[in-house]
Image: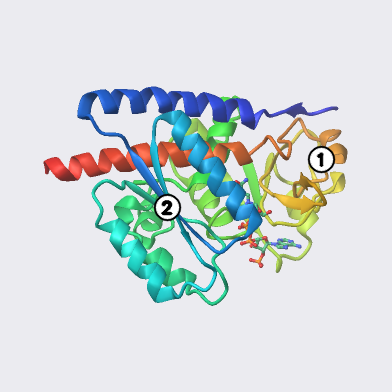
Amino acid sequence: MTARVLDGKAIALQIRHEVQLEVAKVIEATGKAPCLAAVLVGDDPASQVYVRNKEMACHKAGIGSQLFRLPAETTTEQLLSLVEQLNNDPSVHGILVQLPLPKHIDERRVLDCVAPHKDVDAFAPENVGLMSQGRPRYLPCTPHGVMQLLHREGIETAGKEVVVIGRSDIVGKPLVSMLLQKSGPCGESNANATVTCVHSRTPNLSEVTCRADILIVAIGKANFVTAGMVKPGAVVIDVGINRSGDSIVGDVDYHAVKEVASAITPVPGGVGPLTIAMLLRNTLEAFRVAQLKMTT
Ligand code: NDP
């Protein structure tokens, strides 16, 4: 069997186009455009690329963007003060603090300082709580991208055995939460999964992963998942981004697993582009939240 390749890039473009059309409508209705403020501390090359891509994507969607570049020596207090300023700026609807922050900065304090209604990454405890109760304000971008990818490729999760490798707050845990809900952004057929989450302390990992109808991998280890860890005919979603020289590889041994799976995401061109698309959607949503706040 050779797996169908799931084209995340094409789906991301489709979502971005949908957002662009909705943005045009809100601009026409309100005379204002949604605006995303991105904060970049230090000169990590990968972060610079991510932030530039996000700015370009905003521009194409008709969303305004502001970039705040701070030197690597910035203190936690200085960063907190900028975030507070953005929290109080009515022309800013979404705030994104690009991670990772330099080690001396208290990342948790900074993320907790972002006003929940401007928290387009959906990291704030209030937003995580709302999501886990099945009434999300914003959905975290990468997990939501995975859900949209599955849905738009016609892959249902209801009643399926889904195994998620990785339990980070950014990818693994929110994915588990979204898959477990009775319904979600893509309806009941793309929720209601039987979910198992495995991590570095899970013994006999392959025994668990081989049960998966859908295997989602987010660990940050190049080519970690081999063909022997995948049930024949499973759908494999690779969230991993690992730099290998000049190129990028996923957490899945793509060429080997492609011969076992029924569908697989490539890296690059799989989940990655969806993260930005969902960030744009959240920024539009944040604009709507702000408009609603003004009228109530
Ligand atoms: P983290 O490092 O925060 O978490 C990694 C998780 O993988 C942890 O739960 C860890 O377990 C688990 N893990 C590590 N090694 C193993 C192992 N040998 N066996 C089983 N589990 C293991 O990573 P993130 O979740 O932030 O990111 C994961 C990957 O996804 C990275 O490559 C990252 O670059 C990529 N990513 C891609 C995005 C996109 O837009 N496509 C967005 C965000 C991330 P434990 O908790 O026990 O330590």
Q: Position of residue 118 (x, y in %)?
A: 33, 51
Up the image or down, 256 lies above or below 226; here it is above
Q: Residue 26: x and y, percent?
A: 28, 28
Image position, residue 168 (x, y; %):
58, 60
Distance from mark 2 CB to nearest ligand 1 atom below 8 Å: no
| Proximity of marks 2 and 1: CB atoms separated by less than 8 Å | no
Tag of residue 254: 1
Ligand 1: quadrant of the figure = bottom right
Q: Nearer the viewer, residue 272 or 206?
A: 272
Q: Secondary structure at mark 2?
A: loop
Residue most extreme to the left: 296
- Nearer to me, 241 or 45: 45
Q: Is residue 191 visible?
A: no
Q: Can you say which quadrant of the picture contains the N terminus?
A: top right
Mark 2 highlights which residue? Answer: 122
Which residue sits at x=25%, y=23%? Answer: 28
Percent of width and height locating residue 137? 34, 46
In front of the other: 267 or 137: 267
- Number of numbered discs: 2
For marks 2 and 1 on the same chain, the one whose residue lies earlier in the sequence: 2
Q: Quadrant of residue 123?
A: bottom left
Label 2 amino acid? Ala
Residue 20 visible, this orientation: yes
The residue shown at (79%, 34%) is 261
Quadrant for the C terminus in the image: top left
Position of 2 with respect to 136 (left or right) is: right
Other residues around mark 1 within 10 Å, as few (<14) / some (14–19) / many (≥20): many
Mark 2 and mark 1: Cα distance apart in space:
30 Å
Seen in the picture, residue 200 relative to 279 is either above or below; the reply is: below
User: What amino acid does circle 1 point to?
Assistant: Tyr
